[in-house]
Amino acid sequence: MPTSNLVALLRLDIGDTAGEMLNDEYLSRCVTRAVYAVNKDNGSSFSVEGDEIIPDPAGEQRELLLLKAHVNVCSLMRSITANVFSFKSGDKSVDKTKQPSYWADLQGDLEKEYRERTKKSAPDGGLVDDPDSGIMIAPALKPVIYESGIVEDENAALG
């Protein structure tokens, strides 16, 4: 699936179908970051090669990618709006200083929804790397089995 397809769906989700708020480069980056986050959180194996997501995400996987990309957009918008202004002239005033907190609130709500949906769809019974719950998922652990035995080293006693 081309990332541009997910960018178009993401534009619909964020209400920016005309492309006035963010350009495709920003949204493509948000989608790419979402792919790697969903892989980590859900145990999936998507990869981004050029403008393609392989294999094609479908159903709940696609929705998780879009939801995580939306979270990434909120994070990006918090950064963009961090240095907004407030001014007053006579009886008119403009205050944009609350924008970052609004984006932060939306990001928190979407993160919560993402964690809940990921827990429901996770193949390992819903374990998600979630610092709030105290659960931390270790990367794939592989046990090593050693056979017991004695190895004599002639030089050990001389050491």
Image (tube, rainbow, N blue to C red):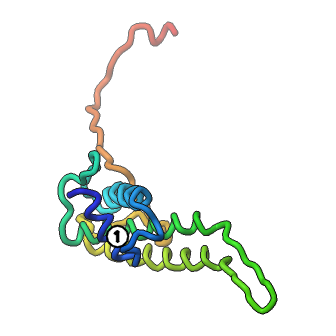
Q: Nearer the viewer, residue 121 or 11?
A: 11
**Which residue position is annotated with label 1?**
10
Tell me which residue sits at (41%, 69%) in the image: 19
Q: Quadrant of residue 79?
A: bottom right
Classed neighbour count for the residue bearing mark 1: other residues with Cα under 10 Å, few (<14), some (14–19), many (≥20): many
Q: Quadrant of residue 33?
A: bottom left
Q: Nearer the viewer, residue 71 or 138?
A: 71
Q: Nearer the viewer, residue 147 or 79?
A: 79
Q: Residue 138: tell me if it is visible.
A: yes
Check disc 1 and report its element: helix, strand or loop: helix
Q: Residue furthest bottom?
A: 91
Q: Position of residue 120 (x, y in %)?
A: 28, 75
Q: Position of residue 130 (x, y in %)?
A: 44, 67
Residue 58 relative to residue 39: left or right: left
Residue 55 relative to residue 87: left or right: left
Q: Quadrant of residue 88?
A: bottom right
Q: Position of residue 78 (x, y in %)?
A: 57, 68
Kind of residue at badge 1: Leu
Tell me which residue sits at (28%, 58%) in the image: 3
Residue 46 relative to residue 127: left or right: left
